[in-house]
Image (cartoon, rainbow, N blue to C red):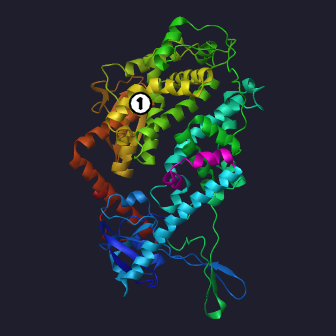
Amino acid sequence: PRLCQPIYNVNTQYIVLGPTEKDCRNIFPDQDEEGIYTFQDYYRVKKDVELSDDNVLFVAQRPFGMPARYVDRNGKVSENATMTIPRTIDSEFEEYDFELLSGLAAVHLPQSVCQESEMADPSLLLLSVVLPQILYNIERRMVADSFIRHCKINFPCLGNYLKDIPISELHIGMTAKATNITDNYDKYEWFGDGVLKLLQTDTLLNAHELRCWVQCLHEGDLTHLRSAMTNNSYLAAACQKVGFDNFVMDTPLARGRWMPQTLELYSHKEEGLVITQGDSSPGMKSCADIMESILGLIYIYFGYKAATDVGVECGILLPQGNEVVELSYAKNMPPERAFQAVQVLTGRTHFHSPGLIEEAFTHPSAVHEAVPSYQRLEWVGDAVLCLAMREWIFRTFPHISVGDMVTLDAAMVSNEVLGYQCFKSTLHTFINHRQQSLPTRIERYKWSVGEDVGRGIWGSDPPKILSDVVEAVLGAVHIDGGFHAGKMAVQTMMRPLMDAVESVKGDATVFRHPITILNEIGGRMFDFEIVREDAFLRDRGRDMKAWHGTGWRQACVDGRESVGSVLSTGQNLVSVLEPSMKSARNRACALAVAVLEDNNELSQRWVEVSTIIERQCTLAITLESNGIASDDEDDLDNIL
């Protein structure tokens, strides 16, 4: 690493780590302003520096600088001018072998704008880079200790729990992603969101203020109430009320934005200018996130009951009664075969209120029934499933990224997975409904998941009623047996899929949606089309075949299925025939992904061509916006 300063601002220092394979023709990450599309455009417009096309981009980090604001003789305040640099996301630098300095934002700098700094004393560099990081981490420890003391005095229940949590984990739980520190509260906030969802669900069912009329509320009303009690504004107001916003670490150690809390700078300059420390306070999102992070921490170390007590103490939850309100009006015993199917799916062998099972199988179309529909139980089961799966992912794969956790969670609680669970356990045969189209839709789904047709998670399209019934059954177990009963029911039901995820060691790429993978490979080069079978035959002709079941066939003029196609630059790459539009599109994308992943050379070529097209499109837009016509550029049609 070398210490360099840009030619357009010699008072600014950068730690340059090394070159990349990118150059100034690459797309600029922030295209908020018109006329800025590449790094060339940015430095020409913002820095008045002309750069050649082949100017290599280097990875650099900005050392620590004190925050300040200037007050002139007239009392006018102006914040110190921090240099505007190309903002990028952390994932853009994961491909490099450079070891980035913790807490300092990484950027791309062109080679020709960097000149080596005149640094006579190496210890000065050490002081400007290492010492601030030490002080920053000391402050994190001090903030955590102060937070514990604050809670012990004002919130004794939370304070007693916090003192038994490892201080390193509390550091993480109080540190926002905005600090650019890898170990931040992202994972705890994501997990705490699931904890809060079930906490508020139980609150709405069992709170003193609601228990007399909770059975009168429709599922939609309950959903709106829960959303209102979990949104950012509600949580941020609660955070500020209890004073937790004073302990959020959300200021990054970079670009003149942080200074030790106990340090005050006063520096007199010419013409009466005075530099003083600027003020900063966490935003609404950070305040809301810290509340979810705390709930996630408490649950992980002390369980659901402790999280409930903390939520009530901090004013997030309403006090709950000791008795659980029975949600069901049903009093009849369900059919024995239905009860056995529920036992196989959830592992629960006894229900205190068997009428809950009858309600779980009652569709909203059965308006003549004396029992309500499954919608409220489905609402409960959605929260039960969310928390149970997030906890399993969090505890089983603690070292994967939040993005991978989100991918796994989305796949495991998807409509496709739950619909298959319902079909496999024969729950669909006990649904009390009056929908004439449902049997036909279930029969089509049964064909699509037959043993002779291989497909992944995203290759089917079960009727949503199937996943709704599964969530309703989970909600019934939770209402009847409490939190642990619901959690065990989810684990029993999802065990085969959980074993499959463990077999690939939590590799989220296995469960990514094929559309996402195609977009990563080809960007805007791929288009997706879904048409009826007769329209496909009319537009493509009889020579164009589509994949159907286990082989290729022509579309039929009187066919009633859907055709999903993947296209590139107007050319049809692959088409798939399926009963539903969604499964046709997904299976076509999955087939295209399989071909590309099986041929690394083809996949790499696609990425290269996609990069060329993106670059040419950006250049064309830039030239057009400036009113410049270029005869030297390759014709885009020839490139395609």
Q: Residue 168: say if magenta.
A: yes
Q: Eyeballing the image, is 629 above or below 366?
A: below
> Is residue 117 found left or right of 297 in the rendered image?
left
Residue under label 1: 583
Q: Amino acid at mark 1?
A: Ser
Q: Residue 47 location, x and y as percent?
A: 46, 79
Q: Residue 163 location, x and y as percent?
A: 58, 50
Kindly identify the residue that appears in the image at 64 percent across and 33 percent down. Answer: 201
Looking at the picture, tell me which residue is in the foreground, 114 or 631.
114
Q: Residue 597 location, x and y as percent?
A: 26, 42
Of all residues shown, which one is farthest toward the top? 336
Q: Residue 341: say if magenta.
A: no
Q: Quadrant of the N terminus?
A: bottom left
Q: Is residue 628 visible?
A: no
Q: Eyeballing the image, is 457 above or below 183?
A: above
Kindly identify the residue that appears in the image at 55 percent across and 70 percent down. Answer: 258
Q: Residue 189 location, x and y as percent?
A: 54, 47
Badge count:
1
> Is residue 369 found left or right of 588 in the rendered image?
right
Q: Eyeballing the image, is 129 above or below 411?
A: below
Looking at the picture, tell me which residue is in the foreground, 13 or 56.
13
Q: Which residues are magenta?
A: 155-171
Q: Main secondary structure of the magenta part?
A: helix
Looking at the picture, tell me which residue is in the foreground, 485 or 48.
485
Disc 1 crowd, CA 10 A, few/some/many (<14, 14-19, 20+): many
Tell me which corner region of the image, top left, top right, bottom left or bottom right, holds residue 61: bottom left
> Is residue 468 found left or right of 493 in the rendered image?
right
Looking at the picture, tell me which residue is in the foreground, 618 or 317.
317
Q: Eyeballing the image, is 327 above or below 545?
A: above
- For the residue labelled by badge 1, is the local secondary structure a helix, a strand or a loop? helix
